[in-house]
Structure formats: C-alpha cells, structure tokens
Amino acid sequence: MKNNHIISINFCNKILFSLVIYLLISCNGLTGIPQSNLLPETHIFLDSIHVQQNSQVYLSWQGDDSDGLIIGYIISWNGKEWFYTQKNDSIFSLKVETSDTNYTFRVSAIDNSLSIYPKEGDIIAFSDMNNNGIHDDNEPFPSLSSSVDISPAALKVPIKNTAPLIAWGIDTNSKSAIAVALPDTTFTFATFQYFVSDLDGIETIASVEWCLNDSSSSATWHKIPLNSKMFNIKESDGLTINADNRIYLRATDIGKLRSKILQYPFEGKVWYVKKPMGPILLIKDSGSPDADAFYTNALQNISGGKFSSGYDVLDIYSSKTVISQAKTLPPFISPMFIETLKLFKTIIWYSDKSPSVELAQQSLPEYMRTNGKVIFITEFPVPLSAESRIALMDFAPIDSISQKEVSDDPLAIRNSTEIKPIKVGAWQYPVLIKEKGSVLVYNLFPKVTASPLYILSENPKWSGTPILGILGENRQMIFMHMPLHLVNKNGGALQFLEIALTKEFAL
C-alpha cells in the first residue's frame, strides 16, 4: 500500500510538471523570451465613396487589438500632419480648393500598451524614412512606440464645390430682406445690405459684385470688399436720374461657381431715384396742415421766388407709427440718411410737439461736421423726458433746458405776444408776433459757443425773458423753440426765413 501511494504521488508530480512546461511554452515560446505587443488593426466604416460629397463629411472608424484594448487614434487629411483623438467619429469641414477637390482620410488605432498617452488634438510626429513629407506604411511614430497601427486605414473622399448663396439683409429670411428695403423713392445715394454664405466655407467666396440696370453678359460689374456686408451707390456710379433703377448682385467662389443673381427692387416694387432740385431740403416732421402751407408758401415766395424750384420735401411724419419710422426713411441712418442730407446745403426741419429727436441726434451732428446748415423749428412734448433732453443737447446748441414750462397755461402766450430778436452779427432779425394757436415753451440755455437769438418778451405770467431761439457755433444751426407758422403776423416769420437763408447761410 505504501509503495502504491508513492507511485501515485510521483505520477501526479509528473503531470503537474508537464502542464507548467506547456504553459511556459505557450506564453513565452520555445525560447522562453516574452512575446512583443501585437499591433492593432484599424477600419473605416466605408470602403469607398463614389458620389461627390458636400464640404461637410461625417466619418466613423474603429480599431481592433488581439492582445489588448483600443485607447485612441491618430488621424490625418494630408498624410503630413497627424492628430491624436479619442473619438471614433466626427463631422469634418473640408476646404474646396478648386471646382472639385479630392481628399484622403487616414486613421490609425492605438492600443493600451503605452504608459503615457497624448492629449486630445496633440500633433503626433512620424519618422519620414524616405523624406517625401508624407507618412507611408510601416514608417514609425516614435512617441507611440509599438502601440500604433503603422499601416493606417485610408479612404478617398471626393468633395463637390457648391455655389454661394446670397440674399438681401442679414440672413436668408424673407423678413430680413423686407427690413432692409429702401423707400420707393430716394435721392441719389443708396445703401444696400446683403448676406452671403457658402456650404464650403465663407473663406471660399472669391468676390461679391453689383451692377446697375443691366445684368447681361456685357454688364459692368463692380466688386465689393469681401470684409464688407454693405455697399453704397451714388450718382457718379451710374444711377439713372429721375427714373426707376434696378440693381443686381452676385457672388462667385474660388471654384468659379456663381450664386443666383439677386435683384432689387423686389418683384412688383419700384425704386425711383430723384435728383435734388436745389440746395434746400424741407423735412416735414409735423402733422399740421397750417405748418405745411406756411413753409411751402415761404419757399415759393421769399427772395422774389429765388427758391421756388430749388427745394425738396421729405415727409418723415405721415407714415410713421409709434413703433416704426416713416416709410420714406431708409433703413440705415448711417450712412444713407446722413449722406442724403449732405446732398443739400441747408436743412429746414420743422416739427410739432413730437419731434424726431433721436433721428436728428443720429444724423445732424455728422451733417454739420461737413459744413451743412440747419434751421430746426420745434415745440417740445410736455413733460419733456430726460431722454429727449439728452438727445436735444446732443445735436442742438443747447446746454440745458428748464425743468418746467415757462407757464403751465397753454393760453399764457397770447396773440400779439412779441418774440424779440437779439442782434448777432451784421444783420437784424425781425420781431416775431404771435397771431394764432396755443403753445407751451421751455426756457433754453445756450452752449458757451452759441448765442441767444430770440427771447420771449417780459410778461407777468412768466419770469424774465426766456430764450426761445439760439444761433449755434460757427453759425451753422438756428434752433427755434416756437412754431413759425404761429408767429407770422406782418410777415415776420417769412422775413426771418429770408434772412436766415440768404444772409446767415449765404444761399
């Protein structure tokens, strides 16, 4: 029994020894040396692409590793620059170099045999064994040691060039185009805003061009700077004067593909371009028929009818609402409205109790910087808001305005009340005598560079002699806080306009 037991133990030891030897051979080979890490394999989920793609392409890929796990990838679109990523899919935006472009996407999987891994987006260098500047199969990536597939998976991606897209406004929405539409009639300066894009990337836009009244093959196209989204047209650019005009716009990309030709005005609309008749623009900012009649009569008759055919009227009152400006105003105060004002030597701007002070604030300072002359006649709303006060002081020769009206009685300034001139310069303005209507006024305090021009005569109903008229710096603006059509007794207001236009402004 004892011998049999010893025999059984020896047999088991032999079996165990054999198993150990077998495992060592299996794991380490016959030499007993540890086997090296097996390189991963990489696959792209498409074998080929035969149909041309847009410049945005979705691709996905994966890696397999027989002795480990896939931790990341390196990818390249040109074989020269390789980037590390942990992603296994992405949308790529590819640049179109010519009308059509072919790209090759390359990707190699990386296994888990490294001790330190790159960061997302890191550039991975390769050993360029044949000095051709491009990674070829079996060329190593030293920083990745033997953990990366050195025979990348590759896929050719043909990219089709797409034509640019162009629209009026800030985008392709139809409301955007309506928002930048010009009035049906403008003077000889117009501003247009446009939107241009390209599926291949905005950098592929080679040019944006416009032409006037002709889109045929013989038309003259004018380039717009690519960094601009607006352009201006003036008389010297070829506008047809006192007639309907039409403008055309197109974009061309680097592959010579063109957008559709955009045109303005829109279907069923007109754009009439009017040449200024003379040096004066009369801005109607009032709903008073009596005021309209007074200014029209004045310009027809003063100075022996000198200005009867030398002025234009811009009505900014009749079509305005509480929430929108008048339809006669362009969508762009700068530059279009300001440049339109500059077509005239003098602006006569008359308003009622709701003057367009914000519009005046945005436009008149720049107009006067180019030596433009202004007569601004207005009442004020009661009460006068802080915002309106600031706007008035921005463009008018006013340092401040009294907090309250000179009298809260609308009948305090009775008919026959005199508004007296203060002589400034070589000529004397006439006394203005109120002959109708009711009006509430504030006391004006001129800027240090300005001079009082008219004061309200003394009366027990108010304190002192409030200032109602101011002559501004460099004699460029006359600001009157009294409606002229109410103070024309004995023709005084007509005389005032004649002196202001012919002597003060030398028209």
Image: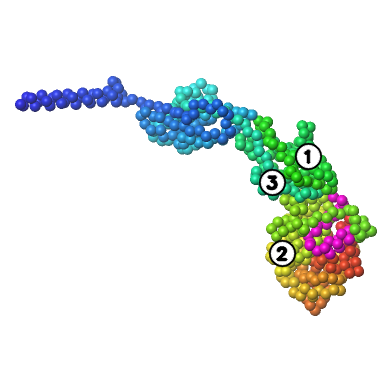
- The structure residue drawn at horizontal position 83% and vertical position 52%, both measured from the top left corner, is 344
Q: Which residue is mark 2?
A: 389
| Camera-side mark, 3 or 2 | 3
- Gap between marks 3 and 2 measured at Cα: 34 Å
Of residues 331 and 8, the one drawn nearer to the viewer in this rendering: 331
Circle 3 Cα neighbour tier, 10 Å, few/some/many (<14 / 14–19 / ≥20): some
Residue type at mark 1 is Leu
Membership of 215 in magenta stretch: no
Residue type at mark 3 is Ala
Image x and y of residue 18, in percent: 21, 23
SS at circle 3: helix
- The structure residue drawn at horizontal position 17% and vertical position 23%, both measured from the top left corner, is 14
Kindly check if marks 3 and 1 are in contact, taking CB atoms under 8 A apart as contact.
Answer: no
- Indicate which disc residue 177 carries: 3
Membership of 277 in magenta stretch: yes
Going from the N terminus, do you reach mark 3 or mark 1 first? Answer: 3
Image x and y of residue 336, in percent: 76, 49
Residue 417 against residue 62 in the figure, above or below: below
Quadrant location of the N terminus in the rendered image: top left
Image x and y of residue 3, in percent: 6, 24
